[in-house]
Image: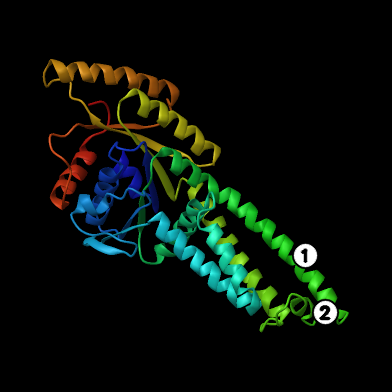
Amino acid sequence: MLLSEAAARRVVFIGGKGGVGKTSLASALALAQARAGRRVLLVSTDPAHNLGHLWQCTVGPEPRALAPGLDALELDPDATAAAHLQQVGEALRRLMPAHLAGEVDKHLSLSQDAPGMHEAALLERIAELVHDAPARYDLLVFDTAPSGHTARLMALPEMLTAWTEGLLQRQERSERFGAALRSLGRDDGIGARALGGEAPAATPGDRDQAIRALLHRRRHRFEHLRSTLADPARTAFFIVLAAERLPVLETIQLHAQLARAGIAVAGLVVNKRAPRDAGPFLAGRHAQEAVHLDTLRAALPALALQEVPLLQQDVVGIEALDAFAGLLASTGGPV
């Protein structure tokens, strides 16, 4: 189910509770698609990055090759927020009078730790990847952070699109007001000099045009991301879980949160399923897991569910990932 559904998509998100094997599944999926001839970019948005440990190499913020046809990168929230604020600062300094540079720096310093800054910056980077990466890659696979963080992130495109639209409307009203003042001969830098500085190097018209271009670009990126996430023909979101009480309940909650954000879940993957024929202890464990999976199926009866068995060894290195991808291709229903 996982591999066949992903083969028909351009973007795949792997989400779920922490510690259920999202990185292993995302990596095996990405590798299998690369082996099938697709150009794949594997992206980790989880602050507790595990790609490097899994692939036994260093993975950073720029794409690096893991296998033929497969590149990977890790989005660090702190570094992403810092880079985002640096870009914002550079844009503001170009647009604002020179004497206000100190105010710009003060605002950016306060913004560094503002609530939601890391999520907004991370979403900007995801939007950029979803918009630009298809020129180089056939498939993007996102290995996401634990459920709560991912649910908030998936709800942001709608909010930030509306917020940017509001900024554009206010900016357009301000631009019309400024044009009216200039037609009366009153916008000659007096306001800037009254604040103790000089008039900006850029003309008001140039500044308005630059601000409008930035906001339109931002709105376009968020609208593209929102439409991509909401399109089941392009995007698939899979929830990975263990057959335990808390992961099952968290999966049901995550599904509801994604539905409110307009994102359909393509399927559920139950990882590390205990075998029923490997001694009484594991047989008992298998029976207990079945109880929790009954709860899951009752709550989400329409979703396809794939069960992946508990493995004897850890999935580490490319050979183990190849074998794990083969296991994903051969499993489907109950183990």
- State which quadrant residue 280 falls in: top left
Q: Nearer the viewer, residue 147 or 263?
A: 147
Q: Identify residue for label 2.
A: 182
Q: Between disc 1 and disc 2, whose residue precedes?
A: 1
Kindly state the secondary structure of the residue where label 2 is placed.
helix
Up the image or down, 10 lies above or below 175; here it is above
Which numbered disc covers residue 132? none
**Amino acid type at image mark 1:** Arg
Which element is circle 1 on? helix
Q: Quadrant of the N terminus?
A: top left
Badge 2 crowding class, 10 Å Cα cut-off, few under 14, some 14 to 19, many 20 or more, is: some
- Give the percent coordinates (x, y) of residue 187: 81, 79
Image point (74%, 77%), residue name: 192
| Disc on res. 173 | 1
Q: Is residue 39 above or below residue 1?
A: below
Q: Horizontal and vertical percent for residue 191? A: 78, 76
Comparing 19 with 233, the one in front is: 19
Q: Using the rendered view, name the quadrant where residue 148 is placed.
A: top left
Which residue extends farthest right? 184
